[in-house]
Each structure stands twice: as C-alpha cells, then as structure tokens.
Image (cartoon, rainbow, N blue to C red):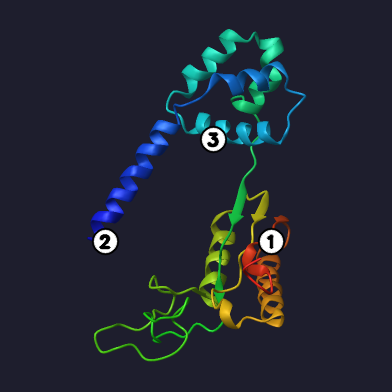
C-alpha cells in the first residue's frame, strides 16, 4: 500500500511538472518586458517562477523564438537575457547545501524505529528489526556527522569547478524537545568549520534555517 501511494505521488508530481513547464502566462512576461526597471517583490517571484518553467520546458527554442518575434531584439534584449539565458553566455556553478540535520548522538546499531521525533540514538532494535546503519538510516533518523563529512569531502574531490556555495541552514537534528542554545551553537560552529575546511577558497552565501533557533518553533 505504501509502495502504491509512493508511485501515485511520484506520478502526480511528474505530471504537475510536465504541465507547469508549459503553462507560461503571457501577462506576467508582458509586464516584465514592458517595464523591466520596475520590478517589485511580486514580479521578482514571478520572474524566478517563470524562468524555472522556461528552463524546464521542452519547448524552450519555440518559446524563445515566439518572444523574440513579438518583442524586437533591441527593446527586448535586456528582459530576454533575464528570462532565457543567451547561448554561450557565462555560467556559474553553485553548490546548494540544505537541511543536513546532522545528529551528533547517532549510534550505529541502535533502535531505528522508535516513538520519538528522531531515532537511531539509543536502545536496541526489536528481534524483528534491524539496527541503525553505519552511514545512516531512512527510518526516522538524521544524518551521522561522519556521513556529512564524507559527502562534502567527496563533492570537493569530484566537483572542481564550484564557483560558490549556497548554504541554507537546518543543520541541527530533530531532537527538538531537548535542544539547548549551547547545542545549537556547537552544531552551527562544527558544520561551518567542516565546510570552511573542505571548501577553503569558496564564497559562501548562507541563510539561517528554522532549526538553528534555540526554540525551533519560531
């Protein structure tokens, strides 16, 4: 039953993406093109949304042609470059890290199915269950530190052309019922140091996630 539900979810998501990629409302594009200097918050959101749709669309070339045909190149060039990148234009490679949720209390072989918000931290598994895996576990557990370390080190080894790191937080584990300010600071400092040591010459653009707070419900 769970398997069927998962397949249904993936099918619906895929169908939505395929449909959404072709649903480009001309009104928003018109406003961005006719008044490109006056971009408010709502238009910025729309711009990001429609750029994603355009880039994911299988009809990208047809869409580019239609827009350039309607809006003459000199007047349209600036907005065109924003909406659809010009072939051959410079590109940047970004590494986006988010929601790592490192659990420093992770215990391999411990109980991976429990009644807490996060497992793999204590107790012995039932005879019918297997214990938490060494590198991590999919059953309600967060990530061991050594796995996070191995992942970022592997990325640094194989991806040599990263221009910057986009780092959007949510570092602490989900044991929100017993976290302290000292716990949060330790997690933030430890993971930040790991990233700085692993990517010593990269620029970081960081954001704080909701789990970094001392009280995670804020």
Residue 134 lies, with reference to residue 42, above or below; the image says below
Local crowd size for mark 2, using a 10 Å CA cut-off: few (<14), some (14–19), many (≥20): few
Q: Label 1: how many residues lie within 10 Å, few (<14), some (14-19) or many (20+)?
A: few
User: Quadrant location of the C terminus?
Assistant: bottom right
Point out residue 177 in the picture as x, y percentages from the top left corner.
57, 80
Rendered location of residue 134, percent (x, y): 42, 80
According to the picture, the residue beneath numbered tag 2 turns out to be 2
Q: Which mark is residue 52?
A: 3
Q: How many marks?
A: 3
Q: Is residue 109 left or right of residue 179?
A: left
Query: Quick one: 119 or 204, which is closer to the camera?
Result: 119
Q: Is 15 on the left or on the right of 31, as rendered? A: left
Viewer-nearest residue: 91 or 127: 127
Q: Secondary structure at mark 3?
A: helix
Which residue is disc 1 drawn over?
Answer: 208
Callout 3–callout 1 Cβ contact below 8 Å? no
Quadrant in the rendering for residue 33: top right
Alpha-carbon span between mark 3 and mark 2: 31 Å
In the rendered image, which quarter is residue 188 located in?
Answer: bottom right
Residue sitting at x 73%, y 19%: 35
Corner quadrant of residue 184: bottom right
């Amino acid at each position: 039953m769970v398997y069927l539900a998962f397949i249904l979810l993936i099918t619906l998501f895929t169908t939505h993406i395929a449909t959404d990629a072709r649903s480009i409302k001309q009104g928003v594009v018109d406003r961005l093109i006719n008044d490109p200097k006056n971009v408010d918050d709502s238009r910025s959101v729309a711009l990001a949304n429609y750029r994603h749709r355009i880039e994911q669309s299988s009809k990208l070339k047809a869409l580019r042609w239609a827009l350039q045909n309607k809006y003459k190149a000199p007047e349209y060039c600036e907005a065109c470059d924003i909406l659809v990148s010009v072939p051959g234009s410079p590109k940047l490679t970004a590494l986006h890290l988010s929601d790592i949720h490192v659990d420093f209390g992770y215990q391999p072989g411990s109980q991976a199915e429990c009644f807490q918000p996060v497992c793999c931290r204590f107790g012995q598994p039932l005879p019918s269950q297997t214990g938490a895996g060494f590198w991590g576990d999919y059953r309600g557990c967060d990530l061991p530190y050594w796995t996070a370390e191995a992942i970022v080190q592997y990325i640094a080894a194989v991806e040599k052309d990263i221009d910057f790191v986009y780092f959007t937080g949510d570092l602490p584990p989900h044991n929100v019922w017993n976290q302290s300010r000292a716990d949060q600071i330790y997690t933030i400092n430890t993971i930040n140091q790991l990233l700085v040591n692993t990517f010593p010459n990269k620029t970081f653009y960081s954001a704080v996630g909701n789990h970094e707070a001392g009280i995670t419900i804020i």
